[in-house]
Image (cartoon, rainbow, N blue to C red):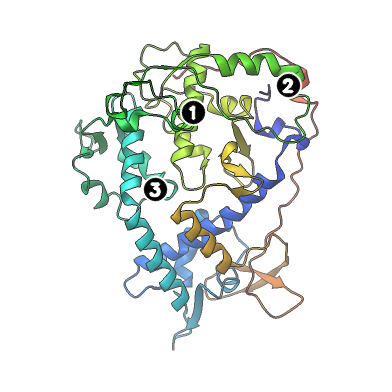
Amino acid sequence: MTTSKRVQDRSKKKRVHELEAATEKWKITSKIFFLMELLEEEPEMVIPVRSLSHYRKQINLPKPHRISDFLRKTPKLFELYKDRNGVLWCGLTQKAEVLMEEHKRVIEENEDKAAEYVSRLLMMSVDKRVQLDKIAHFRRDFGLPMDFRTHWVHKYPQLFRVVKPSLDDVEFLELVSWNSEWAITENEKKNKKIVEGVTETEHTPGLLSLPFPLKFPANFKRVHSYYGEKIKMFQERTYLSPYADAKGLKPGSLEFDKRAVAVMHELLSFTVEKRLVTDHLTHFRWELVMPQKLMRLLLKHCGIFYVSERGKRFSVFLTEAYDGSELIEKSPLFLWREKLLSLVGYRGRKKKFEADSDSDEEGGDGLRLLQSDSDVEDLDVELEQQDTLEYKDPLLEDDSEMDVRGIS
């Protein structure tokens, strides 16, 4: 537990370097994969580099960085060429095309599991339905295909269906049938807490009294001496299963708090990387009955979750799922992402850049890559040091329970 209310207020000493490194590593991969999916959607799987400038925000590549330089640093996946009019085009290499075909196969082979996770998300929701747009935020995290909205959601009519409950054309995905076997949390499965004599098909979610696996950073040595009793009380506290009806819970209560932790734990367990962008989670406050100030909850329970502040968007990890920077249990889709990462060539080492006033075919000022050699096969990025003020240890400032506000 910690009393920090903002990620930026957290002491540098309380950051977990291994998970910060994992964030940076997969952030690079997600940018590359976004461009690969974009190219795959093109009729001839090629696109003018100039057109890619419309996606600077998605790949977080602000000017004066040139997209052509970004692409040239991954020659195993992207190839550039000019047509007779001098227009610079980008396409996928043969190796990249083979990799994308493999990705489709992995998605198809594991789509039943993805359908289970989507169903369980609906089962945890208040009205057993969630806006389709919101679920789309989790597409890559849950291992869903690109045609998730147009085709895939209609493949499992026995599980869920698309509905429009009002006249505003907002589409919802609604649960069709309740599966008692899926109403058992991942934490229950690990603790093997199924009532004796009751089969999984007869299981009814209700009150739970299960501890969560805790994994504190190595330098949190004094956490138990100051917060040991509160951690013990939290771990022993009963709480409502994420799959039980939570409408009667009082926002801000201790039971409300622990159930919200259980919901977060369950959601992160569904994901490929056991990690989510916190922005995506805020969309589900009402549907999943979670506190308005979700970040405070995540920071408070730092033995269960770790919030990384890399980049413009924060990420939250399920700490028990990692050993250092490595995911312990790797799904087929995660193994595919590791293969993609190996072709990106990420090594975590910084290359030097300087501004280039000359514009290229994609328009705008560029950025010229300075290298000690002519090979640009590796896309290397250093984890830059954040200029964050050194705060007093938040664990020693205040030992009161954090105020977790209710949903609005």
Q: Quadrant of residue 382?
A: bottom right
Residue drawn at x 73%, y 66% is 351
Nearest to viewer (mark 2 / mark 1): 1
Q: Residue furthest front?
A: 197
Q: Is residue 2 visible?
A: yes
Residue closest to the eye, 165 or 55: 165
Mark 1 closeness class: few <14, some 14–19, many ≥20 residues within 10 Å: few
Name the residue type under label 3: Arg
Residue drawn at x 24%, y 34% is 174
**Is residue 58 shown left or right of residue 387?**
left
* Image disc number at residue 191: 1
**Is residue 351 shown left or right of residue 238?**
right
Name the residue type under label 1: Asn
Residue closest to the eye, 224 or 348: 224
x%, y% of residue 386? 74, 44
* Image disc number at residue 139: 3
The quadrant in which the C terminus is found is top left
How far apart, in angstroms, are the residues tagged by discs 3 and 2? Answer: 38 Å
Label 3 element class: helix
Residue drawn at x 56%, y 15% is 236
Q: Earlier in the sequence, mark 3 or mark 2?
A: 3
Label 1 element class: helix
